[in-house]
Image (cartoon, rainbow, N blue to C red):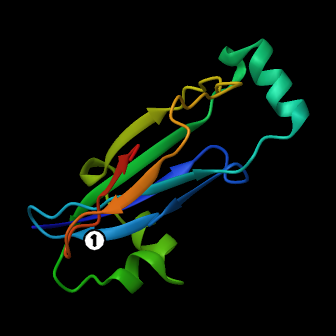
Amino acid sequence: SRCAFKIRTTSRERFSTTPNSGILSPGQCVNVNLCMTALTSEQYSEFSSTPASAKDKFMITSCDAPSDVTEATIRGSEAQQWWDSRDAAELKKQVVLCRYVQPLLKVEVPQKRLSFVREPPGSSKTVGSNR
């Protein structure tokens, strides 16, 4: 059967996910883009000194989605009502914890000249070359 999912975070002002909900058919996959807004210098200093203080999480909730359920049902104005009407036993929940990694302060590229070549038509890969 189809599966409905939604993604929530403990820090909505810091993260956005696209899509944040949807319906998947059996065997179907979805790529979810996760974006983090830039940290203020104060937030960065806090995270740098005590990375364990960052306790942001994502919760992925999913359940079976009958054939009459549409994307609008789980995303639109009636979404909260639909999710709230699910029996707690049918909801599957998974929590994903964030781990903050310090960025590199300096990046060096040994090649003086770097060009990028697109793969043949139909491919979206880009290959780097120093020629």
Residue at 50% of width from left, 43% of height from top? 58
Q: Position of residue 82 (x, y in %)?
A: 41, 73
Marks counted in the figure total 1
Q: Say which residue label 1 marks.
A: 23
The N terminus: image quadrant: bottom left
Residue at 29% of width from left, 59% of height from top? 125
Residue 29 shown left or right of residue 91 in the figure: left
Residue 43 shown left or right of residue 9 in the figure: right
Density class for disc 1 (Cα within 10 Å; few <14, some 14-19, many ≥20) is many
Instruction: Name the amino acid, label 1.
Output: Ile
Q: Give the farthest residue toward the right.
A: 42
Q: Toward the viewer: 37 or 113?
A: 113
Residue 51 shown left or right of residue 111 in the figure: right
Q: Position of residue 71 (x, y in %)?
A: 35, 81
Q: Toward the viewer: 17 or 72?
A: 17
Q: Position of residue 126 (x, y in %)?
A: 34, 57
Q: Secondary structure at mark 1?
A: strand
Q: Quadrant of residue 103?
A: top right
Relative to 16, say whether 95 is above or below.
above
Relative to 55, say whether 20 is above or below.
below
Residue 85 shown left or right of residue 78 in the figure: left
Q: Toward the viewer: 78 or 105?
A: 105
Residue at 27% of width from left, 48% of height from top? 89
Residue at 9% of width from left, 65% of height from top? 26
